[in-house]
Amino acid sequence: MPPQAIRKLQPGRLVIASHNEGKVREIRELLAPFGIEPVSAAELDLPEPVENGTTFYANAELKAMSAADLSGLPALSDDSGLCVEALGGAPGVYTADWAEKRAFEGGPGRDWYMAMGKVEGKLAELGPDVSRSAYFACTLALAWPDGHVEWFEGRVHGTLVWPPRGRRGFGYDPVFVAQGETETFGEMDPARKHAISHRAAAFRQLVDAVF
Ligand code: IMP
């Protein structure tokens, strides 16, 4: 059977199906050259769906489909996370959950410093010679209101450092140094992150396929 043709994205409004400000900012910057009018899920007052999938693909799909269905517009979502080799790929699809504060920690809300500390604590328990290799993964899902979905995946490999460095970026950026780099994603110029990140790698595939 011949491969199914990928649906093209026409110029016009596109929902960025995320409530994570850091992701929305990066996706807006990546979309800038393509004649698309991005509008975020928060701007449209769309609810944040429960991310109960067990893979990046499942969560990306449910976020994009929910936003496309509710808005009547094409919607682009991002499900991403940090996968640490010595932790068997954790936190992986649960990366955002590791930042969730419980009531006694001042929750609800997310604390990225606490989440980075949790990863570091688990590595420390495994001893000083433990591998510090990790990668960020990103799955982008592009959904249309009629239920059609396309997916794209990107990764960036690197090493975890401690203590965290830099105030740029978001999430776990201050502890991640990509292969061949010396600065963490938290220290790096955003333009450089856009050239090498997992999100940029997934985005390049999207651009080749749908524009
Ligand atoms: P989710 O995709 O909404 O489940 O959240 C994934 C989480 O992974 C984010 O909230 C971030 O903490 C983390 N993450 C994903 N991409 C990046 C990145 O580019 N830099 C730092 N952290 C990231």
Image (cartoon, grey):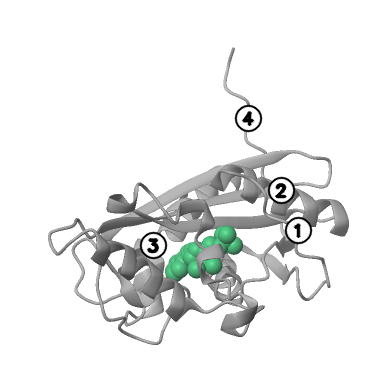
State whether label 3 is within 8 Å of ligand 1.
yes
Give x and y (percent) for residue 180: 18, 63
Give x and y (percent) for residue 111: 52, 79
Q: Quadrant of residue 174?
A: bottom left
Q: Amino acid at mark 1?
A: Pro
Determine which residue is flagged by label 1: 49
Quadrant containing the N terminus in the rendered view: top right
Q: Amino acid at mark 2?
A: Leu
Which of the labelled discs sits on residue 186, or is there none? none
**In the image, which is nearer the foreground, mark 3 or mark 4?**
3
Determine which residue is flagged by label 4: 5
Circle 3 — which element?
loop
Circle 2 — which element?
helix
Q: Earlier in the sequence, mark 1 or mark 2?
A: 1
Determine which residue is flagged by label 2: 62
Q: Amino acid at mark 3?
A: Ser
**In the image, which is nearer the foreground, mark 3 or mark 2?**
2
Disc 3 from disc 1: Cα separation: 26 Å
**In the image, which is nearer the foreground, mark 4 or mark 1?**
1
